[in-house]
Amino acid sequence: MEIWLWAFIGIMAVIIIALLVKIHLLQKAAEEISEAFADRLITDTNTLIDISCRDRYMRNLANAINIQLRKLRSERHRFLLGDTELKNAVTNISHDLRTPLTAIYGYLDLLEQEENTNDACRYIEIIRNRAEILTGLTEELFRYSVIVTTEDNAEKTPVIINEVLEESIAAFYTALREQNITPNIRMPEAKIIRTINRSCLTRIFSNLLQNTIKYSDGDLDITLLETGEIIFANTASNLNAVEVGRLFDRFYTVEAARKSTGLGLAIARTLVEQMKGTISASYENNRLYIHILFSDRYPMA
């Protein structure tokens, strides 16, 4: 009886060891699949997932994931191709618009030198105003095309965010006052320094202030925190949460934003991301909040 008992125990021990080995191999295969899948998502490679395990179920899982990876890679290439074509089209269109606009200004100058009736003078002034608006939109389109088609090679240096923010607000002070907007500014006495591009930061603040002029009901709160986060907040009762969720989409405009290509905030987002920062928008109690954070601290001496 003892012999049979020991034989049974031995058989069960072998089975348990075999199961443990099998479980270990399955765990290893699952880790290989997980690591390979994460790598394939962030790298542009045609290499598919391969595993060392011979288990047919795990290999079937890897093959099924490979099929989806092929589809995903194909869709990614289609997107990148379409995105490149769109960027090139934007660049070409913005460049082509400059020539006829230059001609329009030339003929307007000639017309203004002629004797005209009051009505003719008024019409000429209307045409010039519309041409100036179109010129501004064209320039914005061209700047966007340059930003998105240029590699991230802007020089980064230690920048005092406090100073750039103050300079940007001062530059827009007259435009804000014309809209009866008096900015409420809060920032720490300590210098907030980040390794970024000063010119790009100025452009970001400029676009955000222009956005305030478009949407604000007459107020503006600008806050710089010691963490490096910058918050622009203003009442914008003409917006809603859906519209705010799309503010950073290129070419998206709302009815309140006349004379706009919808590229200002898209440019701001592109520049922020190029400098490894984050930007987001939220809408609460009829107030629009835009948050920017640069976490790359510059060590103080």
Image (cartoon, rainbow, N blue to C red):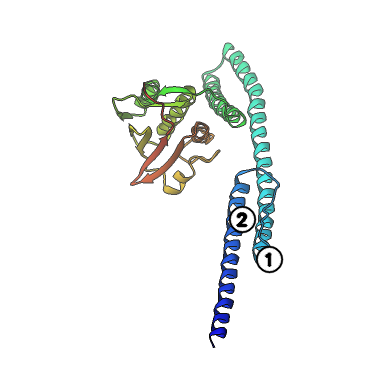
Q: Position of residue 79 (x, y in %)?
A: 65, 44
The residue tagged 1 is: 56
The reply to whether discs 2 and 1 touch (Cβ–Cβ < 8 Å) is no
Q: Nearer the viewer, residue 181 or 118?
A: 181
Q: In the rendered picture of this protein, how many numbered marks are placed on residues? A: 2
Q: Which residue is mark 2?
A: 33
Question: Can you say whether 109 is above or below 11 in the image?
Answer: above
Distance, label 2 to label 1, CA atoms, is 14 Å
Task: Point out residue 246 in the picture as x, y percentages from the top left corner.
Answer: 49, 44
Q: Residues within 10 Å of mark 2 (few under 14, many from 20)?
A: many
Could you say whether the residue bearing mark 2 is in a helix, strand or loop?
Answer: helix
Against 18, residue 50 (above or below) is above
Point out the tag, 2 or 1, that comes first from the N-terminus: 2
Q: Classify mark 1: helix, strand or loop.
A: helix
At label 1, counting other C-alpha atoms closer than 10 Å, the crowd grade (few under 14, some 14-19, many 20 or more) is few
Instruction: Please report the residue visible at 59 percent of the width from the left and 58 percent of the height from the top.
Output: 28
Q: Residue furthest bottom?
A: 1
Quarter the C terminus occupies: top left
Q: Is residue 9 above or below residue 139?
A: below
| Residue lying at 34% horizontally and 24% vertically, measured from the top left | 191
Instruction: Residue type at mark 2: give it.
Output: Ile
> What x and y, as percent, mark residue 213?
41, 31
Residue 257: horizontal and vertical position, in percent? 47, 37
Query: Residue 142 is drawn in which quadrant?
Result: top right
Residue situated in front as seen by the camera: 89 or 101: 89
